[in-house]
Image (cartoon, helix red, strand yellow):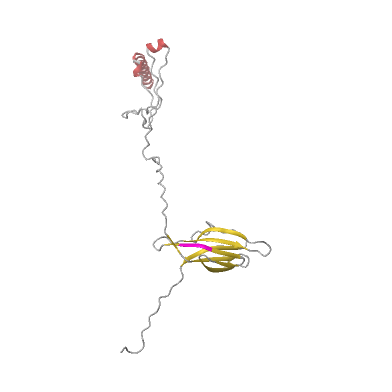
Amino acid sequence: MSQRRLLMAAASCLVLAAAAGAWAQNAPPGNAPTIPGTPPAPPAATPDQKKSGEQAPEEQPPTSQPVTGPGAAGQPQQQAPAEGAAAAPAEGAASPVTPLPPLPAQPAVARTFEDMKIAVLGGLDKVTGRVSTVEIAVGQSGRFGQLTVAARACRKTTPIEEPESAAFLDIVEAKPDDPAAKVFTGWMFASSPALSAMEDPVYDVWVVDCKNPATKAPSSKLPSGNPQ
């Protein structure tokens, strides 16, 4: 009995195998079953492509990255700016800085000076380091070391203006072995000593102030005793 069962099982297997082969030959090629995990077979070329000699394009694997740029679906394509047109600045970019026009020059305001009668000068002996203050009346001269300083004028601004004092000086230096020589003549300014300074290796002179002589009002005395 066992041999008979084995023979019947082998016969049924042969019949199933023959039926499966016949079904596979009669099935259309487009519906051929694919094995999971294997890439799909490339599509067959059409008769038009065979005549022209073109090959079917290979199928590109899909990507998970979204398509961006002007050619993306649903986004309008940007046109290139026309030649000669200024490009608009990108959003968030710093706009170019336009320089401001220069300010107009301010006219110099003339100051009012009043004539004073005394020039107050400062003197420095560079050898000994001695500093002195000399007062010279306008129209007269004074001495500082080997210098003879003559004050020709001394002027000062009014109290309502910026303080400034200027003196016109003539300075002559008399050395023991050399004849007297004028070392400076011109205006000196108290606020800017270096603007018009005397150049001398031994002495230095500058303007401190211009003033008038102090005047004292006469004091009134009450008469002694009771008036009659």
Q: List the single residue furthest toward the right.
A: 177
Give residue 144's quadrant in the image. bottom right
Please tell me whether the stretch drawn in magenta is mainly helix, strand or loop: strand
- Quarter of the image with the N terminus is top left
Residue 204, image x, y percentages: 58, 62
The front one of 156 and 222 is 222
- Number of marks in the rendered image: 0
Residue 184 location in percent, x, y?
57, 59
121 vs 215, left or right, is right
Q: Quadrant of residue 31?
A: top left
Residue 178 placement (x, y as % from top left): 67, 61
Does 68 sit above or below residue 158? above
* Residue 152 is one of the magenta-drawn residues: yes
Residue furthest front as drawn: 228
> What residue span does the magenta drawing correspond to?
151-155
Which image quarter is the C terminus in? Answer: bottom left
Q: Is residue 141 magenta?
A: no
Compare residues 226 and 184 and report the one nearer the observer: 226
Kindly tell me whether residue 15 is visible in this rendering.
no
Asked if residue 181 can be seen in this view, the reply is yes
List x then y, in percent, for residue 126: 61, 64
Q: Is residue 205 above or below residue 15?
A: below
Residue pictured at 60% horizontal, 59% vertical = 182
Vertical relation: 30 (above or below) 170 = above
